[in-house]
Every structure is written in structure tokens, then in C-alpha cells.
Image (cartoon, rainbow, N blue to C red):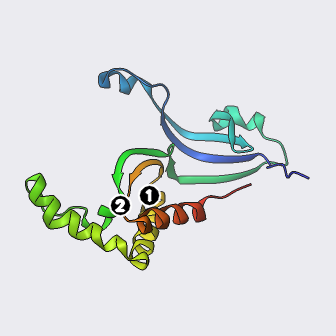
Amino acid sequence: MSSVMPKTAIRGRFLDIQNTVSQATHILDQVRYIQDGLLITEQGKIIWFGDWETGQSQLTDDIKVDHYPEQLIVPGFIDTHIHFPQTEMVGAYGEQLLEWLNTYTFATEIQFADKNYADKIAQFFVHELMKNGTTTALVFCTVHPQSVDALFLKLLSNIKCA
């Protein structure tokens, strides 16, 4: 017996980019801001999106509407290049690349040979991604299997399955 996810609705202020562009100068034409909007989903997919006034006709009595009038709702962010092992050294003094790698990066990354350390940093790293709205990322680990295992186990523990 499969469980059917109910329709859900979110009301609030929305900001997104409607279409991809080939030139940065064209992005302003694609910015969409809806002061009072409605997003309706079914089985994890968006089935309706627009302004609240128009969207009310899409609602039925069985759809619960969560209202966030003070928040700005945006799509999940994508980070195409992030180094999980460098979490604790973000903002470290910038030097020439090789000197910086030897002074900060390699000294930090060697600590990921310790499973407990890798687990602790993975927990913080994933929490920071989620807290800041990053839902998709290309993440680099260290050569230590513990760093990869810690990251994947933490990510898997954050996935909500229907």
C-alpha cells in the first residue's frame, strides 16, 4: 500500500529568476518578485505558483496553507564548487597558493583521518548548507575515506523520504 502525499501550500513573499539568460545584463528582466504569493505542491512537485489572489481558486478544503509573511522564499541555491574539509579554515589569510595550501589546507585536511573529527565537521558543514538554503552542491572531500563516509552519512540522515 503506497501512501499518497497530500497537496501542500505555502503563502508568502517569493523571489526567483524565471528563465536562464546567456548574458548577465539580461538577468534583471527575468527577476520575479511576488509580494503575496502562493505555491502549491503535490507529491513533492510544484503544481501551481503565482499570486495569492489568483491562487486562492486553486485551494480546496483539504489543503493546509502555511503562511510566512515575514520571510522571503527563494529556490534552493546551488554551489558548484565547495571544499568540505576547508570548513574550519574559511576566511584564512590569503597567501600565494602553494604557501596557503601548505600552511592551512593540508594541515586542516590531515585531521580528517580521525573519524570523530570528520563526523563533527560533517555535521556542522551540512547544517550550514541547509541553513543558508543550499540544496545542491558539488562537494570535494579529502583522500581520507572517513571524510567521505562522514559527509554522506550526514547528508543521508537529512534526507526526508515520503
Q: Amino acid at mark 2?
A: Val
Observer-nearest residue: 142 or 70?
142
Give the Cα separation between the discs numbered 2 and 1: 22 Å
Name, please, the residue furthest toward the right: 1
Which residue is labeled 2 in the image? 143
Observer-nearest residue: 28 or 146?
146
What residue is at 45 percent from the left and 73 percent from the top? 119
* Mark 2 neighbour density, 10 Å: few (under 14) some (14–19) many (20 or more): few
* Mark 1 neighbour density, 10 Å: few (under 14) some (14–19) many (20 or more): some
Which residue is labeled 1 in the image? 129
Q: Amino acid at mark 1?
A: Leu
Q: Is residue 104 left or right of residue 134?
A: left
Q: Earlier in the sequence, mark 2 or mark 1?
A: 1
Mark 2 touching mark 1, by CB under 8 A?
no
Callout in the foreground (2, 1): 2
- Residue 113: x, y in percent? 36, 73
What residue is at 78 percent from the left and 40 percent from the top? 59
- Residue 10: x, y in percent? 65, 48
- Residue 65: x, y in percent? 71, 51
Helix, strand, or loop for circle 1?
Answer: helix
Observer-nearest residue: 144 or 25?
144
What residue is at 58 percent from the left and 41 percent from the top? 36
Observer-nearest residue: 130 or 54?
130
Helix, strand, or loop for circle 2?
Answer: loop
Q: Is residue 44 left or right of residue 130?
A: right
What residue is at 13 percent from the left and 62 percent from the top? 93
- Residue 129: x, y in percent? 44, 58
Q: Is residue 21 left or right of residue 50?
A: left
Circle count? 2
Q: Quadrant of the C terminus?
A: bottom right
Q: Is residue 105 above or below residue 135?
A: below
Write down the quadrant of residue 101 in the picture: bottom left
